Image: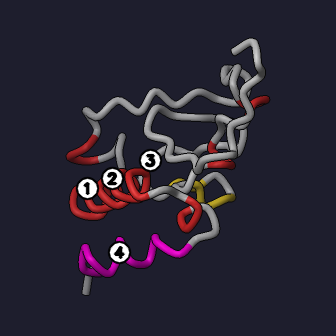
Amino acid sequence: MPEGIEAAVDRMKGTPLYVKLNTAEKAFHDALCTVASEHGKFGAGKTSSIYVNYESPSENEDAKIGVKCGNCSFYMGEGQCKIVAQMVESNGICRLAAIPDGYVKMDSDD
């Protein structure tokens, strides 16, 4: 029997990065998890028309400042994302990232 939407979203909470998200970021995270749970991960099935704009580590110019999958609350490790269907890498990034405050280190020039 398939897991219910609420159970799937609850299962995705409680990760070390999720608990560091602020209230608005948690709402964003939860909403995207609900859509992915109900309709499938983005880039697959019914949600294939949602453009995630994944950039591989070689394309991600912002990985050095912390904008990367490895700092995102959706990243599960081993190439897996909670909401993106394709394989992802720790130093890659997509436009749906939910990164807690303090994980992105901007230079004073940026």
Q: Are marks 2 and 3 in contact (CB under 8 Å)?
A: no
Q: What is the C-alpha distance between the residues marked 1 and 2?
A: 5 Å
Q: Residue at x 28, y 38 (%)?
A: 48
Mark sitting earlier along the chain (4/2): 4
**Three-letter code, disc 3:** Val
Q: What is the C-alpha distance between the residues marked 2 and 3?
A: 10 Å
Write down the residue under mark 3. 84
Q: Main secondary structure of the magenta part?
A: helix
Q: SS for tag 4?
A: helix
Q: Are marks 1 and 2 in contact (CB under 8 Å)?
A: yes
Q: Residue at x 25, y 73 (%)?
A: 5
Write down the residue under mark 1. 35
Write down the residue under mark 4. 8
Q: SS for tag 3?
A: loop
**Three-letter code, disc 4:** Ala
In this picture, is 12 found above or below 57? Answer: below
Mark sitting earlier along the chain (1/3): 1
**Is residue 8 shown in magenta?**
yes
Q: What is the C-alpha distance between the residues marked 4 and 1?
A: 11 Å
Which label sits on residue 46? none
Indicate which label's residue lies in the foreground, 4 or 3.
4
Q: What is the C-alpha distance between the residues marked 4 and 2?
A: 12 Å
**Three-letter code, disc 1:** Val
Mark sitting earlier along the chain (4/1): 4
Q: What is the C-alpha distance between the residues marked 4 and 3?
A: 15 Å
Write down the residue under mark 2. 32
Q: Are marks 4 and 1 in contact (CB under 8 Å)?
A: no
Instruction: Place residue 75 in its image quadrant.
Output: bottom right
Q: Position of residue 58 (x, y in %)?
A: 73, 23
The magenta segment = 3-14
